[in-house]
């Protein structure tokens, strides 16, 4: 029996898998030149993990690989991988991938007491040497050792297999079924492997959630949490954890899409990258306000991602057209993307993982989640809060403005400043929508419960949904209290009528004053005329008197003159005597 040295003189290196997210939590990939055990129950994704490890290694890292299947044929593997986006046929044609199907049964692997896997090693060695393989996948150990009922021989051959892989310097992935209460059926594989990865599928409330955990990784640090993973177009691990409170705080303000609401927010709108909560009862207008946020984002030429968990995309587009919000152009222009799903379709972690992946793919500047309250059926309040805390932290780190709607009902409706998910404390701005029932009517009102970093309005505003969109209206406050709806309209009509009456009365008073002013002015004019006439008469009399006086003076002068002439004529007669 050949002696394969159990040594690894080379320093620890890592072979990147290319699997989205996995290399992040392993800080580089799988241990290069060492075996890794991928274990889990049936259907958890072990084969896909190994296949993607080989396909990406050959295509992206120039490391050819050999896939050894003990249950599926190359044709079956090629078809299965094609549905996930991997062209194994093309890689095989390029000499980068070899698919080996080994059918095992007692007649082929005969247990003789001295039996070993030497024949298998020769076949594997030939396949490896043919393409210069750097990677290999054995799928699965149970199929390989199914013909070895002797536990002692099985353990010996298992150890020898792992040593052989190390001696060949292959980065290996060996898949294995999970045992009852143990990671593997034989309870030995995890001890001889340098890295052990556990894949798990859990059912809760009839919803399946896939999780991955790195059980051990010799000589390397690694993430020790459980991570959700997706299988859609390949294998995607999502290292989602709370990213803490180290995100940047933007000073930029963006419009909500509702001018009156912007006015209530210092006339500038919200801070970019902040998180906004819209809470209220059914029909209070949460989604209608949310789509105004989306429309405003698209108007700025920024992408918006809308996660809708109650309505289909077409239903939302149709309903919003009735209030004058046309989102069709935003969708066709590529600025608005909808992701519609029922919350019960996936578990909490899977929803978070899918949202995380969709955000990374679409790269929006605004994300809307409508509503978050439906997730309460998928987990406890603590679990739901933890999920959305991680989502909020991630969006803040990416500088993405987030809008969440939350349905309040039952006891929450009686205490509106409370949400079932209890995420209000991690939210930057909270717009609370209320229903006001008066005079047999149910009307909508809104106020800003909080908005961090600004002196926002404290007013309660009635808002109306019309074909022109959302209009915020000042509520009527008077002796009758706060009035909304038709009561407000009637009271406003009465106020306008009273105002018109007061204006008419003022106009009448003004006309009367004007008439009196004209009359007084006429009287003044008459008196002025009378005075002028009297003055003229006086002047005439004065002139007459002056004329009379002048003539009298003249007459007197003439008389004086006449008397002087008479005196001078009598004097010569006396001299002649």
Image (cartoon, grey):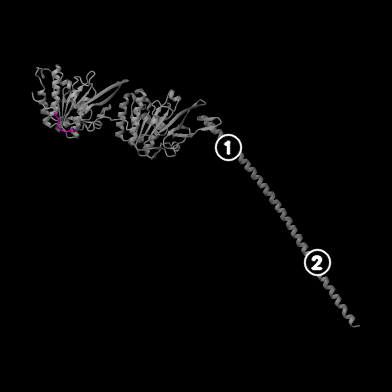
Q: Earlier in the sequence, mark 1 or mark 2?
A: 1
Instruction: Please report the bounds of the magenta region as a residue range.
Output: 7-13
Q: Which residue is mark 2?
A: 552
Residue 538 pos. (x, y %): 75, 58
Q: Furthest-left residue in view?
A: 1
SS assignment for the magenta stretch, majority? loop
Residue 561 pos. (x, y %): 82, 73
Write down the quadrant of residue 490 in the picture.
top right
Q: Residue at x 64, y 44 (%)?
A: 513
In this view, 573 is above or below 226:
below
Residue 385 pos. (x, y %): 36, 27
Mark 2 crowdedness (10 Å alpha carbons): few <14, some 14-19, many ≥20: few
Write down the quadrant of residue 242 in the picture.
top left
Q: Which residue is mark 1?
A: 500
Can you see residue 147? no
Q: Secondary structure at mark 1?
A: helix
Residue 447 or 338: which is nearer the viewer? 447
Q: Residue at x 41, y 27 (%)?
A: 419
Whether residue 186 is in magenta: the answer is: no
Write down the quadrant of residue 508 in the picture.
top right
Q: Secondary structure at mark 2?
A: helix
Q: Furthest-right residue in view?
A: 577
Image quarter where the N terminus lies is top left
Residue 553 pos. (x, y %): 80, 67
Residue 266 or 528: which is nearer the viewer? 266
Image quarter where the C terminus lies is bottom right
């Amino acid at each position: 029996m050949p002696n394969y040295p159990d040594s690894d003189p080379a320093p620890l290196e890592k072979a990147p898998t290319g699997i989205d997210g996995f290399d992040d939590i392993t800080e580089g990939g799988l241990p290069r030149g060492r075996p890794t055990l991928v274990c889990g129950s049936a259907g958890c994704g072990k084969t896909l993990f190994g296949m993607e490890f080989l396909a990406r290694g050959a295509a992206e890292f120039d490391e050819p690989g050999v896939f050894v299947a003990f249950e599926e044929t190359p044709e079956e593997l090629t078809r299965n991988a094609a549905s996930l986006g991997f062209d194994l046929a093309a890689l095989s044609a390029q000499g980068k991938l070899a698919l080996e199907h080994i059918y095992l049964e007692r007649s082929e692997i005969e247990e003789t007491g001295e039996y070993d896997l030497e024949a298998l090693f020769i076949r594997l060695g030939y396949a490896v040497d043919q393409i210069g393989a750097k990677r290999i996948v054995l799928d699965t150990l149970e199929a390989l050792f199914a013909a070895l009922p002797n536990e002692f021989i099985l353990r010996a051959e298992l150890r020898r297999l792992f040593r052989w892989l190390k001696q060949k310097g292959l980065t290996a992935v060996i898949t294995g079924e999970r045992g009852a209460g143990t990671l593997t059926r034989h309870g030995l594989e995890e001890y001889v492997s340098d890295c052990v990865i556990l894949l798990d599928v859990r059912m809760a409330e009839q919803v399946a959630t896939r999780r991955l955990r790195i059980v051990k990784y010799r000589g390397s640090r690694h993430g020790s949490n459980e991570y959700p993973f997706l299988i859609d177009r390949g294998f995607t691990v999502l290292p989602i954890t709370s990213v803490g409170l180290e995100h940047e705080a933007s000073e930029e303000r963006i419009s909500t899409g509702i001018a009156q609401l912007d006015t209530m927010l210092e006339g500038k709108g919200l801070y970019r990258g902040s998180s906004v909560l819209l809470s209220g009862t059914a029909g209070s207008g949460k989604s209608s306000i949310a789509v105004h946020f989306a429309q405003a984002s698209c108007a700025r030429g920024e992408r918006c991602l809308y996660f809708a968990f109650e309505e289909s995309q077409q239903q939302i587009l149709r309903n919003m057209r009735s209030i004058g919000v046309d989102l069709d152009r935003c969708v066709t222009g590529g600025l608005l993307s909808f992701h519609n799903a029922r919350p019960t379709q996936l578990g909490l972690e899977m929803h978070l993982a899918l949202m995380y992946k969709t955000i990374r793919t679409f790269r929006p500047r605004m994300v809307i989640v409508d509503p978050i309250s439906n997730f309460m059926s998928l987990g406890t309040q603590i679990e739901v809060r933890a999920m959305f805390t991680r989502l909020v932290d991630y969006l803040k780190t990416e500088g993405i403005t987030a809008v969440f709607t939350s349905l309040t009902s039952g006891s929450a409706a009686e205490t509106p400043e409370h949400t079932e998910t209890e995420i209000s404390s991690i939210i930057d701005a909270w717009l609370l929508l209320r229903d006001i029932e008066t005079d047999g009517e149910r009307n909508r009102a809104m106020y800003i419960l909080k908005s961090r970093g600004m002196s926002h309005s404290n007013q309660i505003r009635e808002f109306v949904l019309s074909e022109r969109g959302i209009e915020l209206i000042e509520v009527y406050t008077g002796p009758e209290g706060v009035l909304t709806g038709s009561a407000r309209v009637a009271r406003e009509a009465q106020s306008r009528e009273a105002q018109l009456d007061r204006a008419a009365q003022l106009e009448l008073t003004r006309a009367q004053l004007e008439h009196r002013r004209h009359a007084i002015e006429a009287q003044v004019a008459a008196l002025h005329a009378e005075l002028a006439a009297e003055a003229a008469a006086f002047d005439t009399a004065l002139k007459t008197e002056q004329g009379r006086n002048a003539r009298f003076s003249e007459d007197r002068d003439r008389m004086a003159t006449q008397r002087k002439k008479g005196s001078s004529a009598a004097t010569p007669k006396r001299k002649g005597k």
